[in-house]
Amino acid sequence: MTVHTFRPLLRLEGTATVPGDKSLSHRALLLSALADGPTDVTGLGTGGDVRSTAAALRALGVDIQFLPHASGGPVTRVSGRSPRLWHTPTEPLDCGNSGTTLRLLTGVLAGAGLDQGGLRAVLTGDESLRSRPMGRVARPLREMGARIDLGPGDRAPLTVIATELTGRHHDLPVASAQVKTALLLAGLQADGETVVREPYLSRDHTERMLRAMGAPIESRGTIHRIRRAELSPLGRYAVAGDPSSAAFLIVAALLHPRGDLRVNGVCLNPGRVGFLRVLERMGARVEVDPHSEVGGEPVGSLWARTSALHATDLDPDEVPGTIDELPILALAAAGAEGVSCFRGLAELRVKESDRLARTAHLLQSLGVQVEEGAEELTIHGLGSAALLQATAFDAGLDHRMAMTAAVAGWVGAERVDVTGWSAVATSFPGFAELGESLS
């Protein structure tokens, strides 16, 4: 595996942009592929996960072209058509490291290709993805009539054989935007009404985009209803910057003794900036400047400066809105004054890695006292990120753990050697170079 060394930066100042949001990029490609007509997407995320979605859609018969650069940057033209016209791929669909690709496609493919005599598709991915549970999406889809075969342990590879679907009422045991989206996209192809109830509200990018495309979707709190419909193409869609990627730079600026950083063009969807509310409780100096709206999503800038952070607790109902930022929030807690307790973290066990265990291991190797429970972390803050010690850390195939370790190297007292750095290409190619350019 690749190893990258991160050393303390003299400063962390300037202006930065982040890649197009992964969640929006996946949905822009997939929902545009379901509509009857072309959509030109700009600002698409450049990571491997998004490329996996594009490659899978092409294998299913969707025309996706990467056009010459325009004034707004690269343009991806998706010429959508009814999923009933999609065809069986000639090879298994390789979703790489992307759980979003696999789970969302499973929802669509459950009812696809029926005007072409039916569709059969095998979905697989890398070692990390094949270790993640897929029963949580397969079980409710089967209740709608879907034919889905899982591998041992309810894991990928999984096989989808398309069939006619019937709407059902689903009560999700865990708030998951991926599972919710898979069920809503299956509901677009099902007879009757599909209802999805969440225990907590997860990110709502799918609902916003579906409304913009004319879908008959109704959301009231944590309950979402949808019926069979054909989608109208968006025509043009600009993907805003990824707030989860921005979170790593923001925390780096807060913890660095010479931090003064503005990140522009960030998606400020309320369901995606829960990490800012946590940091605000910790005393972070972060200013939020919303200045526009793109495709129903608020967009703006974040300005972070060196801050003396203090401990905070994180409750289970905050986890869905901070799920991708929890490792970097844990690093912020390590550099804060006092003891922080993060609860309700079971979902971290089934991400690209066991992020709960890996986060605890990383902080402990940096010299931080941490207690790891079944679903919680207790972090005894050092009161200064500069007290973090040198370490070597194996991020495995987990891009967010790799970036958390990188930030520790930038703001700590000594170097951090990160094994498995190549995983960062799935979401933020150029992260290391960007951070070092701000010094």
Image (tube, rainbow, N blue to C red):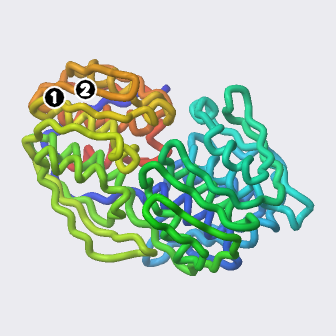
The image shows a total of numbered marks equal to: 2
Of the pair 250 and 321, the residue shown nearer to us:
321
Residue located beneath label 1 in the image: 339
**First in sequence: mark 2 vs mark 1:** 1
Seen from the viewer's position, the closer of residues 343 and 275 is: 343
Say which element carries label 1: strand
Amino acid type at circle 2 is: Thr
Residue that badge 2 annotates: 378
Name the residue nearer the viewer: 364 or 12: 364
Examine the image and state in which quarter residue 195 appears. Answer: bottom right
Q: Is residue 439 visible?
A: no
Q: Secondary structure at mark 2?
A: strand
Residue found farthest to the right: 117
Residue 202: image location, x then y, percent: 44, 53
Question: From the viewer's perspective, is residue 207 above or below residue 8?
Answer: below
- Please state which amino acid type lies under the numbered disc 1: Val
Assess whether mark 1 and mark 2 are in contact (beta carbons under 8 angstroms). yes
> Could you tell me if residue 71 is visible in this image?
yes
Q: As drawn, is 18 to the left or to the right of 51? A: left
Q: Position of residue 382 (x, y in %)?
A: 12, 26
Residue 383 placement (x, y as % from top left):
9, 31
Apparent side of residue 150 relative to residue 286 in the rendered image (left or right): right
Q: Is residue 277 above or below residue 233?
A: above
Left or right side of 310 for 424: right
Q: Residue at x 18, y 38 (%)?
A: 312
Which quadrant of the structure image shows residue 254?
top left
At 60% across and 75% down in the image, what residue appears?
216
Image position, residue 229 (x, y; %): 69, 74
